[in-house]
């Protein structure tokens, strides 16, 4: 089982790191332009973005029980999303990783073992990231994103230099749903919406999980969360394109 997110930095300190890749700067502000399209074959939702844009992300999968149902739910509601997968989980469930990619969602790197990168040496950080990319290729995910999300949000200047040296784009989040903390579906929805509404038109990158013990609650929270966001004038978008592995 992956470690819980105990000791995670407070949401106010977490942000999507500005990073450069092939001349493309990735920031939360860019959620307003150049966004990824809805999953293939799913018609786009009406463009009602008066309140801002929200990008949903899911960590710690793939899960053989939760992830396929999450994919169906997101496609049914025409919501793009980014899945940050661990190499260990990809190796255990390669067919689920392929499913996510084939349904048009962005697949990204969450390290091999869900390690706290700030506690590792440079060579170990590189191994964690490269091993996950290898696992994705072996699973048949041929267009994995260069996005890397450090587990627990544990990053610093040294870790980011190593990641960029690998051609990776480090990405954190601006809204923590705290679904990892055992909240009920109502609690997850309430926690997420309160933070998104507080950020308003600044745009939000939401942290959810499809690979923790409480992920069933996340799955249950999402339909009403998506409905409320759209009702309030938010558009659900994908993260900006960050290039893919060659």
Image (cartoon, grey):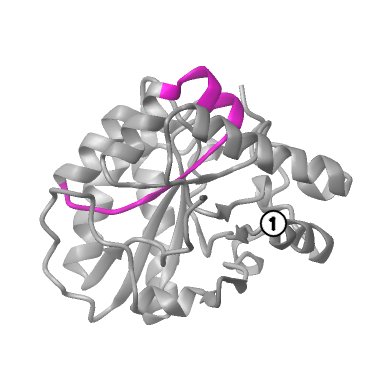
Badge 1 marks a residue whose secondary structure is loop
Q: Is residue 216 visible?
A: no
Q: Residue at x 89, y 45 (%)?
A: 121
Quarter of the figure with residue 217: top left
Nearer the observer, 169 or 184: 169
Q: Which residues are magenta?
A: 77-94
Q: Position of residue 146 (x, y in %)?
A: 54, 54
| 117 in the magenta segment | no
Quarter of the figure with residue 96: top left
On screen, residue 89 versus residue 96, left or right, reads right
Q: Is residue 164 visible?
A: yes
Q: Position of residue 7 (x, y in %)?
A: 73, 46
The residue pinned by badge 1 equals 9
Q: State the quadrant of the N terminus.
A: top right
Nearer the observer, 77 or 241: 241
On screen, residue 104 versus residue 139, left or right, reads left
């Amino acid at each position: 089982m992956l470690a819980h997110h105990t000791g995670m930095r407070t949401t106010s300190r977490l942000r999507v790191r500005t990073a450069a890749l092939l001349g493309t700067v990735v920031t939360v502000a860019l959620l307003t332009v150049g966004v990824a399209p809805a999953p293939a074959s799913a018609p786009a939702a009406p463009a009602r973005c008066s309140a801002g844009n929200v990008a949903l992300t899911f960590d710690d999968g793939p899960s053989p029980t939760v992830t396929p149902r999450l994919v169906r739910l997101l496609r049914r509601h025409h919501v793009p999303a980014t899945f940050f997968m661990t190499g260990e989980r990809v190796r255990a469930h390669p067919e689920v990783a392929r499913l996510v990619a084939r349904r048009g969602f962005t697949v990204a790197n969450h390290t091999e073992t869900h390690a706290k990168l700030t506690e590792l040496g440079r060579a170990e950080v590189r191994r964690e990231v490269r091993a996950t990319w290898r696992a994705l290729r072996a699973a048949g995910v041929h267009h994995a994103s260069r996005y890397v999300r450090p587990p627990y949000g544990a990053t610093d200047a040294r870790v980011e230099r190593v990641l960029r040296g690998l051609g990776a784009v480090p990405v954190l989040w601006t809204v923590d749903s705290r679904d990892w903390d055992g909240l009920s579906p109502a609690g997850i929805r309430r926690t997420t919406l309160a933070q998104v509404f507080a950020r308003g038109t600044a745009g939000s990158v939401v942290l959810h999980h499809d690979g923790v013990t409480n992920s069933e609650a996340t799955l249950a929270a999402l339909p009403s969360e998506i409905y409320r966001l759209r009702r309030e004038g938010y558009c659900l978008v994908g993260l900006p394109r960050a290039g893919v592995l060659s």
